[in-house]
Amino acid sequence: MVFHPALPTLAFPAMKKIASLLLLAATGLVLTLSTSSAQHPPKPLRACLVLGGCCHDYAKQKDILKAGLEERANLQVEIVYTEDKSTKARFPLFEKPNWAEGFDVVIHNECSADVKDLPYVENILAEHKRGVPGVNLHCAMHSYRTGTPIWFEYLGLQSSGHGPQLPITVTYLDKESPITKPLSDWVTTNEELYNNVKIMDGTIPLARGKQGAGEKEGNDNAVIAWTSLYGEKKTRVFSTTLAHNNSVMSDDRYLDLVTQGLLWACGKLNDDGSPVKGYGPAAK
């Protein structure tokens, strides 16, 4: 062995001290990064909430949904609202190319049954085709009746009408879905039960609704909540026909359902039904 006197040698205690200092520094760095991560949770999901059109109290529902959803998830809801109360309500946003750019999810709560302009509807769907998740509420299911099935293919289910307003018994079917795992069956106040004309291939029913004692009082056991995958990109889509009335929309059980569906659509729901870390209400 060759000895180089020019190279300094360290006594064992000194080496041990340096090793300890390095370990402390590394531990401090990990703790700093951990603390920083805890202090700076992921950015809120950006949701575009579209409301307006016929037959509903959208002026109040926009506030009910925004407050209820933001309370339940790390979410920032941006409202797109028109005061047009007709069945032909349109939204300038939907006229633009790439209109959903910057949003993580779009919540459709419009009622525009007589908007039949095919290029307009195709432009709405183009953003979902490119992968922007969708959440569809109540009268969104009765909108954009263009004479083609394109809107219903996006929704995953076709509906054409409803019976009288009576309480609906909500029964969750897929108890293993991360959306429904934390939820329990319930009964609404007076509400519209939408019919099922066609359930598209690949649609997964999550809940059925029963209204009254028989068919004369409504549609028996119609699917009222479901998931589907849209287009070549398999965009996640969650829908529920519930919430004509504000009393249902403001119900904690309804808002819990929609929040679960939204987080699932965005890929922010664990298999056990809990939000992915950083996307629950405590993250805000």
Image (cartoon, grey):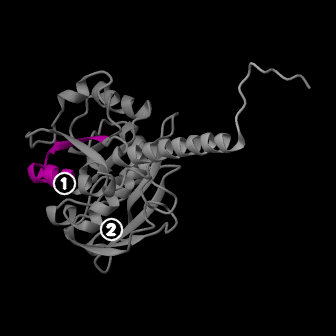
The answer to whether residue 145 shows anywhere in this view is yes
Tag shown at residue 257: none
Task: Kindly indicate the quadrant of the structure image that contains residue 225.
Answer: bottom left
Looking at the rendered structure, the secondary structure element under dot 2 is loop
Q: Position of residue 145 (x, y in %)?
A: 29, 40
Q: In the drawing, does residue 4 fall left or right of residue 66? A: right
Q: Residues within 10 Å of mark 1 (few under 14, many from 20)?
A: some
Q: Position of residue 167 (x, y in %)?
A: 23, 74
Tag shown at residue 67: 1
Q: In the drawing, does residue 65 fall left or right of residue 130? A: left
For the N terminus, the quadrant is: top right
Q: Residues within 10 Å of mark 2 (few under 14, many from 20)?
A: many
Residue in the foreground of this view, choosing between 119 and 240: 240
Q: Is residue 194 above or below residue 119?
A: below
Q: Position of residue 248 (x, y in %)?
A: 21, 65
Residue at the farthest front position: 5
Mark 1 vs 2, N-terminal side: 1
Q: Which residue is mark 2?
A: 219
**From which residue to which does the magenta span run?**
46-66
Give, as a three-letter code, the residue at label 2.
Asn
Q: Is residue 127 above or below residue 259?
A: above
Residue in the foreground of this view, choosing between 58 and 146: 58
